[in-house]
Amino acid sequence: MTGRSREKSPAFHMYLAGFHGPSGEPLGVNQTPGPNHIRQYTGEFWTSRQRQASSLHEISYRACFKPQLPGFFIGLLTREGDVVYDPFGGRGTTALEAGLLGRRVIANDVNPLSKILTEPRLSPPRAEEVVGRLEAIPRDGDRADRDLSMFYHPDTEREIVALRRYLLGRREDGTADAVDRWIAMVATNRLTGHSSGFFSVYTLPPNQAVSQKSQERINRKRRQVPEYRDTHRLIVRKTKSLVSGLTAADIENLHRAGVDAQFFTGDARATPGIGPDTVRLTVTSPPFLDIVQYREDNWLRCWFCGLDEDAIGRTVTMARTIGDWEVVMGEVFRELFRITMPEGYVAFEVGEVRKKTVRLEEHVVPLGIDAGFTGEGIIINQQSFSKTSHIWGVGNNQSGTNTNRIVVFSKP
């Protein structure tokens, strides 16, 4: 089946036609050129100030979008009980936002860390439960099976090893429960960072784990030596922070979503566990070209979670050319068409890469249409980026990915 560029969802376009930004500014609308021309809407559709994101989202992961992005499309294009899907789940922003808004959740990511970081937050425990469980976990472990002395004080390292042994043992013998999975998620997020809230000495932000040699250079430059960090106390502190903003309705929605939530670990091009015509809305951001090095960023998290970082690194798609990227994404779109229900949607977030020389939406539009979708529009959300963008070599509307650019498709 061949899709169409002609828009078919009047409600979608009526909403956008009447949209005004937070400062009252009108929406910019134009038509993209070429045979697949679709409407392009430019404005400030969401900001971090429009609706404070849930504290539950505060888990660091490279290449993640703000919760306001999936929240915008979930609120606009779905109703309570609808299935929302993310084939490139990452830290779980789409899945969590869907759960908080009373939608059903399906998520996939080739990296098993995604499930470890996402699934527990659909069943958040009480802080008292975490405290009680940690009291039963020994602190006195051995030194790690690799040199981590540049990151941790020896006593901190022993606590991490003891915690790792306990969590992996519970997972292997099938006794791990929601509290264990929560502790594993929080500890994975606290392994390294650039404040006293992390287990490590000062290092890069927690979504990037530097190599041992790089950390030694950081230590020499800063003249620092790892100090003792109480890992159990930090896990409890982060737990309280994550759940602090949850309302009773949030918790109810999350637990309801968690009952039948599905988490897959595999290639987004083939998801046999998802039935045809199942998903009302997909909101996702695919791996971009060659910006993020997932293996290098996650080697320490993989070690703690008992995962093979080399095997994972080989499975993560890091296309070096537009042509290779298009081949992979074309297959992803064909799979998305299979699982999307009639009158369902796909919101596919991409960005300007390689210093504005590549605008991926121009390559995404024909891929979706060739798979059978109808092109509804390109949403361009313009706003200032946070300091995190500078990690990517991106300035505030100066170079690189300076906007959120989302191509919206529907299934006839």
Image: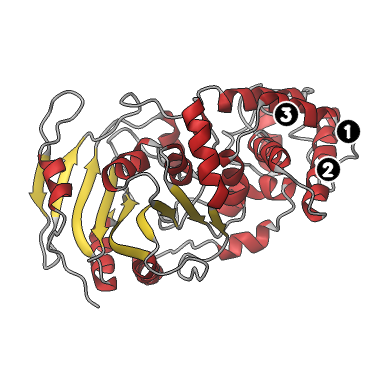
Kindly report the distance in space between the C-alpha atoms of the residues bearing marks 3 and 2.
Answer: 17 Å
Q: Residues within 10 Å of mark 1 (few under 14, many from 20)?
A: few
Sooner in the amino-acid sequence: mark 3 or mark 2: 3
The image's mark for residue 166 is: 2
Kindly report the distance in space between the C-alpha atoms of the residues bearing marks 1 and 3.
Answer: 16 Å
User: Would residue 10 appear left or right of 73 to someone viewing this image?
Assistant: left
Query: Closer to the observer: label 3 or label 2?
Result: 3
Q: Are marks 1 and 3 in contact (CB under 8 Å)?
A: no
x and y percent of residue 87 in the render? Answer: 45, 58
x and y percent of residue 274 in the render? Answer: 48, 65
Q: Are marks 3 and 2 in contact (CB under 8 Å)?
A: no
Give 71 or 266, whichever is nearer the viewer: 71
Q: Is residue 356 visible?
A: no
**Residue at the (40%, 48%) spot, across then down:** 81
Query: Which residue has dot 1 on it?
Result: 138
Amino acid carrying mark 2 in the image = Tyr
Query: Which residue has dot 3 on it?
Result: 129
